Amino acid sequence: MPGRRQRARVEDVHELALGMPHVTVVPGPLGNPVYQVGGKSFVFFRNPRPDAFDPETGDRYDDVIVLWVGSESDKLALIQDAASPFFTTAHFDGHLSVLVRASRLDELTREELAEVVQDAWLSRASERRCRTWLEERAGE
């Protein structure tokens, strides 16, 4: 339907992260992708951990994606609304990142996800790379 915004999907996370400049992908401990810029992770697919679990069943979430943010205020802006798919756990207190379950990505538009992935990249890329990328986009 024209005018409808495309809902975000897991494939979009991969495509958007790979679409940023100077990105490398390294395998995580269980072979899960870790997207890096300049050797610094900015998006990765997390292994099931005891701190992120279904409150009803106690089962560990096996679909958690970690995205870096630029500041604590950016993090709070994403997680403070209880209806938001973004969340954090005590394990990530003081860590400039947010979590989102792949199963909830469709609560975001692809454009919203793109903004979060781009911000993650900007939070980890070098100042020169950020400046160059932002300058190139200013002309669009």
Image (spheres, rainbow, N blue to C red):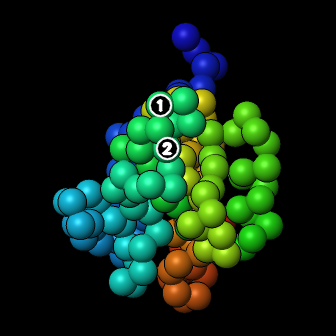
Residue at (66% x, 69% y) in the render? 93
130 left or right of 72 in image: left
Q: Amino acid at mark 1?
A: Thr
Image coordinates for residue 91, horizontal then vertical, percent: 56, 66
**Residue 79 sits above or below residue 29 on the image:** above
Given this view, does label 2 or label 1 mark the residue nearer the observer?
1
**Front-most of 42 and 100?**
100
Q: Is residue 103 something that shows in the picture? A: yes
Q: Nearer the viewer, residue 50 or 140?
A: 50
What numbered label is drawn on residue 72? none
C-alpha gap between disc 2 and disc 1 = 8 Å
**Residue at position x 63%, y 63% from top?**
90
Relative horizontal placement of residue 134, taking residue 53 as reference (left or right): right
How many numbered marks have been drawn onto this rendered protein structure?
A: 2
Classed neighbour count for the residue bearing mark 2: other residues with Cα under 10 Å, few (<14), some (14–19), many (≥20):
some
Position of residue 46 measured from the top left corner of the image (x, y, whole percent): 38, 57
Quadrant of the drawing holding the C terminus:
bottom right
Where residue 128 sits: x, y (%)?
54, 88
Determine whether 76 is above or below 128 in the image: above
Secondary structure beneath disc 1?
loop
Please, what is the three-letter code of the amino acid marked with disc 2?
A: Phe
Q: Which element carries disc 2, helix, strand or loop?
A: loop
Q: Image point 39% across, 84% down: which residue?
A: 38
Q: Residue at x 72, y 51 (%)?
A: 79
Q: Is residue 32 left or right of residue 6?
A: left
**Quarter holding the N terminus?**
top right
Q: Which residue ends up furthest to the top in the rendered image?
A: 1
Residue placed under numbered mark 2 in the picture: 53
Mark 2 in CB contact with mark 1 (< 8 angstroms): yes
Q: Which mark is residue 57?
A: 1
